[in-house]
Amino acid sequence: MKIQLLIAANESDYSEYLSNVLSMKYADTFVVGTCSSEDKLEYILSAKKHDVVLVEPEWVPALKGQNVKLALALWSGQSSLTEAAKDTEKVHKYQRISTLVSDILEHYARVAPGYGDFDKNRGQIVAVWSPAGGVGKTTVALAVATRAVSNGKTATYLDMEHFSSTDAYFTQEGKSISTLYEKLSLNAEILLRSIRLHDSGSGIDYFIRPNNYDDVNELKMEDWKTLVTVCANTSDVVVVDLPSICDWRTQAVLDLADIVFIVSDGSRTAASKLNIFVSQHGVFENIRHKARLISNRGAKLVDPRFDMVIGLPRVQTDDPVSVFKTLSGNAFGM
């Protein structure tokens, strides 16, 4: 459901510009209205319910008794605040709109109803995993996400590794995914929208790495499942880059996934670990029907235990972005 947002500001140019940007770039999140005078504000609020009101600090008293879930004072940081405005949550009026949107959503997540139906309109969940590290799992995950975008779908890349390499592929600044980790008890879908970023080069949605490498360890199994499912509820495809361990959290995501790509590169170490997992681990039998083996870096793997083996070429470049974009030319059987 979209958020009913009212911009109540005394600068009509500001209101019109902000309204136009939100209506175009964030049409899937907001339904936007404007109000340019305090006299009209009370009437508008009495006539229609609003979820969020961005309001001039001096107009805050007009909100008293109105049916508004969240009031945010548009503060320039220069003028003094009235007593009523001092007790109201504030957002900076003149800042980058993407940051303003992030602030609005983070505040709204505290008062919004909890997200209940986790299976409604759920997108496809793709897990990318390997029992061996260093086999190119992350580049494969990003290639899969990029392929989904090229097929006309929205795709979210969710890095659940303890030591994230997101910085090697994306350079945008934003709020860390730790913001979401810390507040999963609030409305997780709205929080996710507040910190998710978009890479214009690949078309992938993604998150800034955790503030601390150990933050992932603080998450419970249900937290992992919530993160993955909420991403799937806000995207056509979510690609989960899993750590090269097979603990109960990883297993929970493998069970939840619609497709599981298991990556190997033909090295003796990777082959040995893969054989142990497939032949001795009960988890494989549970996911066998949806597991596909990725034969990465030009390896010629043949394994009858997998119904599908997908061969990827070795890409001769040191640029990790070029690698995953080149690999995205493969269809991956999706």
Image: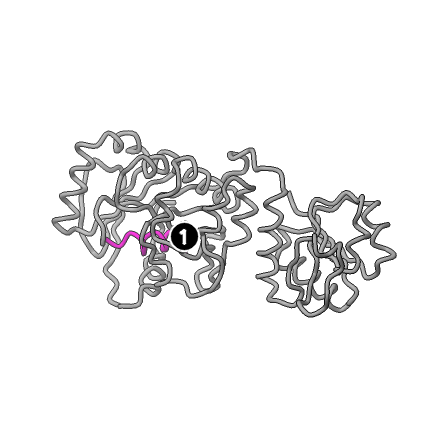
Q: Quadrant of residue 211?
A: bottom left
Residue 65: where, in percent of width, then height? 80, 43
Q: Which residues are magenta?
A: 135-147
Which image quarter: residue 12? bottom right
Within the magenta stretch, is there residue 138? Answer: yes
Please state which of residues 300 and 159 is positioned toward the viewer in this rendering: 159
Residue 238 image offset from top left, x and y in percent: 44, 46
**Where is residue 175 drawn, in percent x and y?**
49, 57
Q: Where does label 1 land, which residue? A: 145
- Specify whether residue 165 is painted magenta: no
Q: Is residue 122 left or right of residue 57?
A: left
Residue at 38% across, 36% down: 221
Q: Is residue 119 left or right of residue 79?
A: left
Q: Amino acid at mark 1?
A: Ala
Instruction: Check the image and name the residue furthest to the front.
Output: 83
Q: Is residue 110 above or below residue 147?
A: above
SS category of the residue bearing label 1: helix
Q: Residues within 10 Å of mark 1 (few under 14, many from 20)?
A: many
